Image: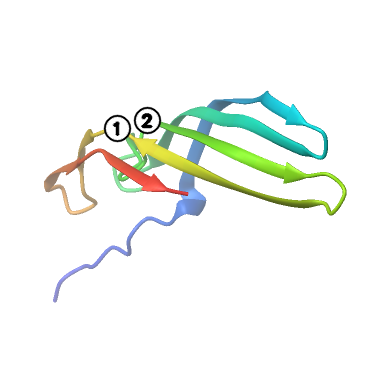
Amino acid sequence: MRLVEPPYNAGQARFWGAELDWCVPLLRNGAYELTFTGSHAEMRGEVSKARTGGNDGVKDLPPQVTNVGLDWRHHPSKWSGGVAINRAPAFTTDSLNPDGIRETKRRNASTLPG
C-alpha cells in the first residue's frame, strides 16, 4: 500500500505582476494609419503546499514577457491588421515536488510571432 498525493491545482496558487502597454502612432496618411504597439509584463506566482505548509514558485511561469508589433488601419473601411513578436527570456525554477524530490526546470528563451 502506498499513499499518492494528487498534483496541486492552479486554484491553490497566487499570481501577481504589472504590465505596461504602449501605442505610438508612426504614420497617418489620409485614410491609413501605422502604429507601433507593445507591452511588457513582469509576473510572479507561488503555490501553497498543503503537505509542508510552505510556499513554492510556480513552475513554467516566465518572469517577464515582452511583445512589440506594428498595426495598420484603413479608417473608412474599418479594416485593420498587424504583426507582433513575443519574447520570453530563459529562466530556471528549482523546487520540491509533493513527494519531496527536488526538481530543476530550465526553459530556453523563446521568440514567437504573434
**What residue is drawn where x is 63% and y is 40%?**
71
Residue 61 is situated, as x and y percent measured from the top left of the image, at 36, 41
Q: How is the image coloured?
A: rainbow
Instruction: In the rendered view, tell whether residue 113 sits above or below residue 23.
Output: below
Q: Which residue is mark 2?
A: 63
Give the residue at the far right of this rendering: 76
Q: Nearer the viewer, mark 1 or mark 2?
A: 1
Q: CA distance from mark 1 to mark 2?
A: 8 Å
Q: Which residue is mark 1?
A: 89
* Kind of residue at disc 2: Pro
Instruction: In the rendered view, tell whether residue 104 sits above or below residue 22.
Output: below
**Helix, strand or loop under label 2:** loop
Residue 62 is situated, as x and y percent measured from the top left of the image, at 35, 37
Q: Nearer the viewer, residue 100 or 39?
A: 39
Instruction: In the rendered view, tell whether residue 70 sits above or below residue 10.
Output: above
Q: Nearer the viewer, residue 15 or 107?
A: 107
Dividing the picture into quarters, in which one does residue 4 lie?
Answer: bottom left
* Kind of residue at disc 1: Pro
Callout 1 touching callout 2 (CB < 8 Å): yes
**What residue is drawn where x is 20% and y is 41%?**
108
**What residue is drawn where x is 18% and y is 54%?**
99
